[in-house]
Image (cartoon, helix red, strand yellow):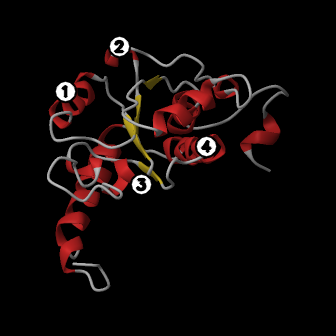
Amino acid sequence: MGLEEKLPSGILLTSVEKLAGYARKNSLWPATFGLACCAIEMMATGAGRYDLARFGMEVFRASPRQADLMIVAGRVSQKMAPVLRQIYDQMPEPRWVLAMGVCASSGGMFNNYAIVQGVDHVVPVDMYLPGCPPRPEMLMDAILKLHDKIQDQKLGSQRAREIVELEQAALVATPTAEMKGLLR
């Protein structure tokens, strides 16, 4: 005999953390940051056939102050990296980044001095989406997985503690350049 049985019907019990997670995941507003061919697929995702509006994301924001999800679609040049970082810094907290395509994730086939070898060198990335270019269905799947990640995110001091733990784990991890099996 729990508390749920004593309450009248129509009463919903949840934690503030879960309620805030539900509200955050269903109100993502993406920022437009299309840099290459992946941007065409990102635009197609917002069009009528795939209809990103069913997730509450129908309007891609031109102002970073109105957006909380940055979808980096395409390769990032060295000249564009400071602009990308400035736009990220102008976004309000909480904010998330989705690296769309192999060029945004790792530099892709452009292994040269002009292209940043992974947007995670410029901004922290929450979700990587592979493909060249990834299909709109793949972008929608990545957004749904990001929704799940946002839903389970901690709040307040617990979130700060979680960030510190993740950073400490990243600092003691083996650097990518020293991992076995890479083509270096």
Q: Residue at x 64, y 28 (%)?
A: 52
Which amino acid is tagged 1? Gln
Check disc 3: other Cα within 10 Å, few if <14, some if 14-19, many if 20+. Answer: many
Give the mark, 3 or 4, whose residue is nearer the N terminus.
3
Depth check: 56 or 23 in front?
56
Determine which residue is flagged by label 3: 102
Q: Is residue 137 visible?
A: yes
Residue 52, placed above or below residue 164: above
From mark 3 to mark 4, how far is it between C-alphas?
A: 19 Å
- Residue situated furthest bottom in the rendering: 180
Q: Residue at x 46, y 38 (%)?
A: 37
Determine which residue is flagged by label 1: 86
Q: Is residue 175 visible?
A: no
Compared across the picture, whether 9 is left or right of 103 comes to right
Q: Which of the two discs, 2 and 3, sits closer to the camera?
A: 3
Q: Is disc 4 placed on a helix, strand or loop?
A: helix
From mark 1 to mark 2, how far is it between C-alphas?
A: 12 Å
Give the mark, 2 or 3, whose residue is nearer the N terminus.
2
Give the mark, 1 or 2, whose residue is nearer the N terminus.
2
Which amino acid is tagged 2? Ser
Determine which residue is flagged by label 2: 63
Which amino acid is tagged 3? Val
Give the mark, 1 or 4, whose residue is nearer the N terminus.
1
Give the mark, 4 or 2, whose residue is nearer the N terminus.
2
